[in-house]
Amino acid sequence: MARVDPDRHDDGLEDAMTAAAQTASAMIGTAAFEVKRDDLRDTRLVGGSIDVTAETAAGRAVLAVDRFALTANNITYAAFGEQMAYWSFFPASDGYGRIPVWGFADVVASGAEGLAAGERIFGYWPMATHCVVEPARISARRFVDASPHRRDLPPVYNSYERVAADPAYAREREGLQMLLRPLFALSFLAADFLDDNGVFGGTQVLVSSASSKTSLGFGHAMQRLARPGIRVVGLTSPGNRAFVEASGAYDAVATYDAIDGFDPSVPTVYIDMAGGAALLTRIHTRFGDNLVYSCRIGGTQWEDLAGRMDLPGARPKFFFAPDQMVKRHGDWGPGGFDTRFGEAWQSVLQPASGWLAIVDERGPDAVERRYRETLEGRVPPDQGLVLSLAD
Ligand SMILES: NC(=O)c1ccc[n+]([C@@H]2O[C@H](COP(=O)([O-])OP(=O)(O)OC[C@H]3O[C@@H](n4cnc5c(N)ncnc54)[C@H](OP(=O)(O)O)[C@@H]3O)[C@@H](O)[C@H]2O)c1
């Protein structure tokens, strides 16, 4: 991995990272892990610095990113970086980008009234040692980053939670929270969307990347809905089949090569977490007009992402989770969404502490190695990576 330090021609990156710990000084050294936007295998580590005095004088807050989760979801942010503006959250230069990750950070210094140094915050960060935000709409529970470059981006990513005011927060469950909660929000909403639409008349739901945390959460959420007559089938790769079967998240499990043996007369919905063009084509071709809904969500198969395609059966549609969330906030009234989501989340949290082994590692070399494993799909599904760029 290349190491570049545009702000510090005399000092080494190690000096920059040591300085990152010296939060009392006005300038702090930073490091960020970046990937080439058009070649996700090309990575670099970039050193820099933050003028804390200037940032706080302008009303901004400087946070030290302590721990973040890394899963296929973050690779998908990169793969859809241009198309869905994921590169815009944490801008970089020279054709490189900073992949967003979910995790915890501590406020190092703050010029925002109502937000003090020392607070721990959950939210959306770059893969970096630090992040500067412009806190606005500060309430007891959360604030919003109102930085100009983020104003037009989806609000769900600009909201930051103050963990001290979160009754569900527990330090020992941070790993599970950052690994699973953002993903489970999608799982919950996707299952609810199907339920809300009568599963589009289907009696079978196929879910790809069945070993992914998001698909497992979807399977679990479908079980909670307990719709009679609906069979949810997890599709996975041969190496992950035993794990998926043991998870109990689906009514049945099949490997991708079994699709051509499925009964094509069964009205079927496809929940597409893989995003691969070849897989999408096989499923549409197999079921034809009996593919009653094709719901595009993820892109774990990021090297074969399907574009607009003319396929038999229902036209694939992207699922936009915030739309369903807004709808349910209306349908369920004040507090209704939070109560239902909170109950569902608690029901996955406890079992997850049994099957998900958290791998907690620090430092640029660990981040680089684990990023490559995630990119190439080499992380076992029962592992959850929790990383930090700081040593
Ligand atoms: N649209 C949204 O708002 C939203 C929100 C959350 C998640 N998602 C999507 O859900 C998907 C799953 O994310 P996750 O974080 O839950 O994943 P994860 O737990 O890291 O999933 C890992 C699994 O994904 C498949 N996979 C991973 N890398 C692969 C590769 N390079 N090539 C082929 N398959 C690969 C494998 O599943 P199999 O062996 O079972 O095939 C692997 O076991 C992502 O694409 C993500 O973008 C979307």
Image (cartoon, grey):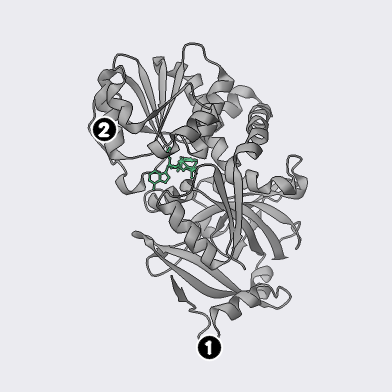
- Which residue is found at the position 37% from the left and 66% from the top? 95
**Residue 305 appearing in the image:** yes
Q: Does residue 230 appear to the left or right of 179 in the view shown? A: left
Q: Residue at x 49, y 45 (%)?
A: 380
Three-letter code, disc 1: Asp
Cα distance between the residues tagged 2 and 1: 54 Å
- Residue 281, which numbered label? 2
Placement of 290 over or under 87, stated as above or below: above
Instruction: State which mark lies toward you, 2 or 1.
Output: 2
Instruction: Answer few, some or many: residues within 10 Å of disc 2's Cα (few below 14, many 20 plus, some between 14 and 19).
Output: some
Q: What is the quadrant of the C terminus in the image? A: bottom right
Q: Look at the numbered discs 2 and 1 and tell me whether their residues touch, using CB distance below 8 Å.
A: no
Q: Secondary structure at mark 2?
A: helix
The quarter of the rendering in which ligand 1 is drawn is top left
The disc placed on residue 389 is: none
Which residue is painted at 67% across and 64% down in the image? 59
Residue type, label 2: Thr
Q: Quadrant of residue 279?
A: top left
Residue 58 percent location from the top left of the image:
65, 68
**Does residue 28 appear in this view?**
no
Q: What x and y, as percent, mark residue 122?
A: 65, 50
Q: Quadrant of the N terminus?
A: bottom left
Residue labelled 2 has its Cβ within 8 Å of some atom of ligand 1: no
Q: In this rendering, is residue 94 above or below 38?
A: below
For numbered disc 1, what is the local secondary structure?
loop
Above or below: residue 214 compared with residue 58: above
Q: Which residue is mark 1?
A: 10
Give the x, y percent position of residue 304.
30, 45
